[in-house]
Image (cartoon, rainbow, N blue to C red):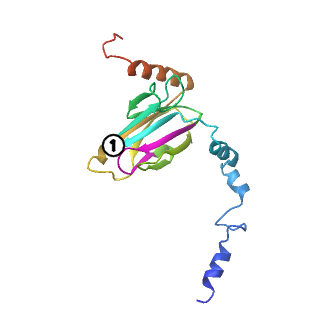
């Protein structure tokens, strides 16, 4: 019909307060916080870890004593991503080989990992526990076994776990416990 595109565009115009695109005050009421997002964009939040996806595992790299990821003192762990509860967490998601998709169903947290890209991911875990971490992208013959876990712990327990990971990382495997 004549003028259908113009009428459709007017009906769903983002500049008015249509039902399809609610005003900013509604978004804020629903939990969107533009100030938090802009703070993150400015680089005020340092990543807690770098998570690498590869066929067919997850590897987490935590910063070492210098607090910077990508230096010689980094700590690495397979399959388990440990994060503190009630803390804004930012991590960098990367892929070594093909497209993967980081997915924690309980958090409704899903982000594709693309080879050659570093993708910042932000979330806040509000309840301690152990949650499934899976790949939601068909990434090859071993996709079915590409799983891990996200462990959410208290801030004190997080510090303790980082110390344990550091001791394990620097261990020669012969220490008595």
Q: Which is the main secondary structure of the residues drawn in magenta?
A: strand
Dividing the picture into quadrants, the one containing residue 9 is bottom right
In the picture, the quarter occupied by the N terminus is bottom right
Q: Residue at x 50, y 20 (%)?
A: 160
Expressed as whole percent of the image width and height from the top left, the position of residue 177 reads 36, 11
Looking at the picture, does residue 167 appear above or below residue 51?
Answer: above
Task: Check residue 128 for magenta coloring.
Answer: no
Residue visible at 63% across and 45% down in the picture = 41
Find disc 1 in the rendering and name its residue.
146
As for residue 101 lying within the magenta part, the answer is yes
In this picture, which residue range is highlighted in magenta? Answer: 89-104
Q: Which is more toward the observer, 131 or 4?
A: 4
Q: Position of residue 147 (x, y in %)?
A: 36, 41
Q: Give the camera-side residue of 53 and 89.
A: 53
Disc 1 crowd, CA 10 A, few/some/many (<14, 14-19, 20+) = many
- Relative to 106, residue 170 above or below: above
- Looking at the rendered structure, the secondary structure element under dot 1 is loop
Left or right placement of residue 134 versus residue 13 in this view: left
Q: Residue furthest top?
A: 176
**Residue at x 39%, y 42% (from the top left corner):** 53
Q: Residue furthest left?
A: 141
Quadrant hosting residue 164: top left
| Residue drawn at point x = 37 percent, y = 44 percent | 96
Q: Position of residue 66 (x, y in %)?
A: 53, 24
């Amino acid at each position: 019909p004549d003028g259908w595109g113009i009428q459709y565009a007017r009906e769903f115009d983002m500049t008015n307060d249509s039902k399809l695109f609610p005003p900013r005050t509604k978004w804020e009421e629903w939990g969107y916080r533009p100030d938090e997002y802009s703070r993150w964009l400015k680089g005020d939040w340092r990543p807690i870890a770098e998570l690498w996806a590869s066929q067919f595992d997850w590897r987490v790299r935590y910063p070492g004593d210098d607090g910077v990821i990508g230096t010689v003192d980094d700590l690495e762990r397979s399959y388990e991503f440990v994060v503190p509860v009630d803390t804004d967490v930012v991590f960098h998601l990367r892929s070594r080989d093909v497209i993967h998709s980081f997915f924690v169903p309980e958090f409704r947290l899903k982000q594709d990992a693309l080879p050659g890209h570093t993708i910042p991911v932000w979330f806040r875990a509000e309840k301690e526990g152990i949650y499934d971490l899976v790949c939601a992208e068909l990434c090859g013959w071993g996709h079915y076994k590409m799983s891990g876990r996200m462990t959410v712990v208290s801030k004190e327990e997080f510090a303790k776990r980082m110390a344990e990971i550091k001791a394990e990382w620097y261990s020669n495997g012969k220490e008595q416990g």
